[in-house]
Amino acid sequence: MVHVATEKASVAVPRQLQLGGHVGFDTLPDQLVNKSVQNGFSFNIMCIGETALGKSTLMDTLFNTSFGSAPSTHNLPNVKLKAHTYELQESNVRLKLTICDTIGYGDQVNKEDSYKALVEYVDSQFESYLQEELKIQRSMATAHDGRVHVCLYFICPTGHGLKSMDLVCMKQLDNKVNIIPVIAKADTISKSELAGFKARILAELRENKVNIYEFPTDDETVSETNESMNSHVPFAVVGSTEFVKIGSKMVRARQYPWGTVQIENEVHCDFVKLREMLIRTNMEDLREQTHTRHYELFRQRRLQQMGFVDVDCNNKPVSFQQTFETKRTNHLACLQAKEEEVRQMFVQRVKQKENELKESEKELHTKFECLKREHLEEKARLEETRRLLEEECQELQRRKQQLSNGSSHLSTLTLGRGKKK
Ligand SMILES: Nc1nc2c(ncn2[C@@H]2O[C@H](COP(=O)(O)OP(=O)(O)O)[C@@H](O)[C@H]2O)c(=O)[nH]1
Ligand SMILES: [Mg+2]
């Protein structure tokens, strides 16, 4: 007993030992980095926003490339999602980037269901991942992971506040995806209006209990930057595909008759802050949060829906196999009950049909009897008529005979009288 207790204690608190020299497992982090770099990374962005709010332009600006997306029309009958995947490489790091664009969002007269297609898309990506996880032969490393890591929600630069469609959509998505709201086309809002606009947006999100993604402050290497950046959300962004020469450098900018907006100038807009937070500092956290928070929630809900539980009603742990066995037994019992029910129904139907047949046989029999009787009566009647007719015929014959006998006697009498003359 004492021996077991000591063993248990040694498992709970491992002994600390000094190494006599260099062993080499301090290279584990490097091994991990090398492996990740070899495998490459994937990142999936969903851009939600009304048509022509500058979503495609901002994506081109963020990744400093041209994704070549065609402008969409304003007259689609419903919201559609289009996902395109691109392979990008920077130094020796390969990134498989999927951009999921919302086509026709906010273009319908009735905007009540605008969010549905988006929720369905996010859920369907989680579902594909779950199905891959549940396979016997899994290929998690090679299968395409389409789970949405971040949702950039483009807010219309009205200067007033959020539209009800924005709040409904963000509320529907906030426990499924990391939402980063951005104020689109921020060059259309004056500097003095912007602070008030940002404050109103945040207040409306708070009032409606919409949870947006917060840059993590638990990692001390980035906690300071992230904390200060959290106070700039929603970022007021400007995108452009044009380059303008400023000094000796060509920079992304938008030119107006009264001046030039430099996209990467932090005085002009928050684009650099967004790029810093989204790509350079928190891309891995967004991926991790998607897996550990949002996907985990989806997985829990789906497995519970399928009938799996961790503990039974007595709070005792239940294994996957036990649940499966119970479900199998229940399913078989259910099948048996159904089979019995069908059998009973069949017997009932056969009996009913039998009764029906018997009934109609009886009916036919009665009908037959009745017809037979009628036939016999008719026959008897006809017999009687025949007999009467025959008697009449005989009578006629007899009379005819009599008549012929009478006429021959008369002629004999006439003849005799003649001879006498
Ligand atoms: N003023 C302004 N116009 C922009 C900005 N970003 C894009 N645009 C313009 O808005 C129009 C629609 O942009 P696009 O990226 O196709 O919008 P999408 O439909 O949301 O993808 C284009 O003419 C862009 O040049 C911006 O930040 N400010
Ligand atoms: Mg577009």
Image (tube, helix red, strand yellow):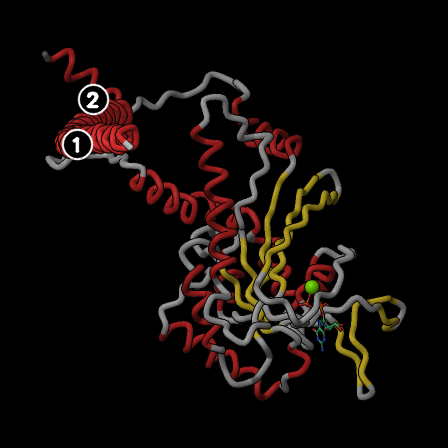
* Residue ID at (59%, 27%): 31
Q: In x, y percent, where is residue 209?
A: 36, 68
SS under mark 2:
helix
Q: Are marks 2 and 1 in contact (CB under 8 Å)?
A: no
Q: Nearer the viewer, residue 213 or 404?
A: 404
Real-space CA distance between mark 2 and mark 1, rounded to the nearest whole angstrom: 138 Å
Q: Tell me the kind of residue under disc 1.
A: Glu
Q: Could you tell me if residue 54 is visible in this image? A: yes
| Location of the C terminus (image quadrant) | top left
Q: Dot 1, crowdedness within 10 Å: few (<14), some or many (≥20)? A: few
Q: Residues within 10 Å of mark 2 (few under 14, many from 20)?
A: few
**Labelled disc at residue 143:** none
Quarter of the image where ligand 2 sits: bottom right
Counting from the top left corner in percent of width and height, residue 78 is at: 57, 64
Tell me what residue is drawn at x 60 percent, y 30 percent: 142
Disc number placed over residue 9 in the picture, else none = 2
Residue occupying the point 56% across, 44% down: 146
Disc sitting over residue 395 in the figure: 1
Callout 1: helix, strand or loop?
helix
Q: Amino acid at mark 2?
A: Ala
Of residue 220 and residue 73, the one placed in the foreground of this image is 73
Vertical comparison of 342 with 193: above or below: above
Q: Quadrant of the N terminus?
A: top left
Looking at the image, tell me whether mark 2 or mark 1 is earlier in sequence order: 2
Residue drawn at the location 41% of the way across and 77% of the way down = 203
Residue 294 screen position, x and y as percent? 42, 49
Q: Is residue 313 above or below residue 183?
A: above
Res 368 seen here: no
Residue 253 in the image: x percent, y percent?
79, 72
